[in-house]
Image: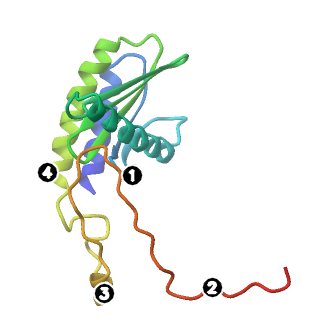
């Protein structure tokens, strides 16, 4: 998919523009990795944690009446984790050393977030996902969930499903 390559190129350019940047990750707001340049980091876990933090940050901005989510900055003893909105469907997370220029981190993070939002918006359209080239079976079409638009940072609500079969009783325990 071309969007992954373009986003990865943007993440690599970020490393050259921000001294002391140690990693970067672009993901969907649901926690799926789009691209990453984060050595020594598990990208899937970081994307999932980013999605969770994004949900909390979104609720916090709502509760404090501060408008839409824009960015989140966390400082630990070893450095920073900065998360920036990248449109309505993606998010950019940057990892930096403790001595990073935070102003530069914000400046470049915001710019890259806007670029990634544009890349995702121009490359990802309905029906162009990973499995768009596969023919769908009739049963699959009937069971397809409806996709509803939701604000950035909100988490999907899962509805419990009834099992299609009755569980067998266990004997001999």
Q: Which residue is mark 3?
A: 137
- Tell me the crowding category of disc 3: few under 14, some 14 to 19, or many 20 or more residues within 10 angstroms, Cα based: few
Discs 3, 1 touching: Cβ within 8 Å: no
Q: Which residue is mark 1?
A: 32
Relative to 63, say whether 156 is above or below.
Answer: below
Relative to 169, say whether 66 is above or below.
Answer: above
- Indicate left or right for 168 with 20 as reference: right
Between circles 2 and 1, the one closer to the viewer is 2
Between circles 4 and 3, the one closer to the viewer is 3
Q: Position of residue 84 (x, y in %)?
A: 29, 32
Between circles 2 and 4, the one closer to the viewer is 2
Q: Position of residue 37 (x, y in %)?
A: 41, 37
Q: What label does residue 142 carry, if any? A: none
N-terminal of the pair, mark 4 or mark 3, is 4
**What is the secondary structure assignment of the residue under circle 3?**
loop
Residue 28 or 120: which is nearer the viewer? 28
Q: Which residue is mark 2?
A: 167
Between circles 1 and 4, the one closer to the viewer is 1
Q: CA distance from mark 3 to mark 1?
A: 25 Å
N-terminal of the pair, mark 1 or mark 4, is 1
């Amino acid at each position: 998919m071309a969007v992954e390559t373009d986003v990865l190129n943007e993440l690599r350019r970020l490393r050259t523009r921000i001294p002391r940047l140690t990693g970067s990750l672009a993901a969907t707001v649901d926690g799926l990795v789009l691209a990453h340049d984060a050595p020594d980091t598990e990208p899937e876990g970081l994307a999932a944690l980013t999605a969770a933090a994004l949900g909390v940050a979104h609720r916090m901005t709502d509760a404090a009446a501060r408008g839409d989510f824009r960015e989140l900055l966390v400082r630990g003893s070893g450095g920073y984790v900065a998360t920036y909105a990248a449109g309505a469907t993606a998010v950019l997370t940057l990892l930096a050393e403790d001595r990073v220029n935070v102003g530069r981190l914000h400046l470049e993070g915001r710019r890259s977030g806007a670029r990634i939002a544009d890349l995702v918006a121009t490359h990802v359209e309905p029906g162009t996902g990973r499995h768009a080239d596969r023919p769908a079976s009739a049963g699959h079409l009937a069971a397809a969930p409806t996709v509803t638009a939701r604000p950035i940072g909100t988490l999907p609500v899962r509805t419990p499903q009834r099992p299609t079969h009755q569980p067998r009783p266990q004997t001999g325990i």
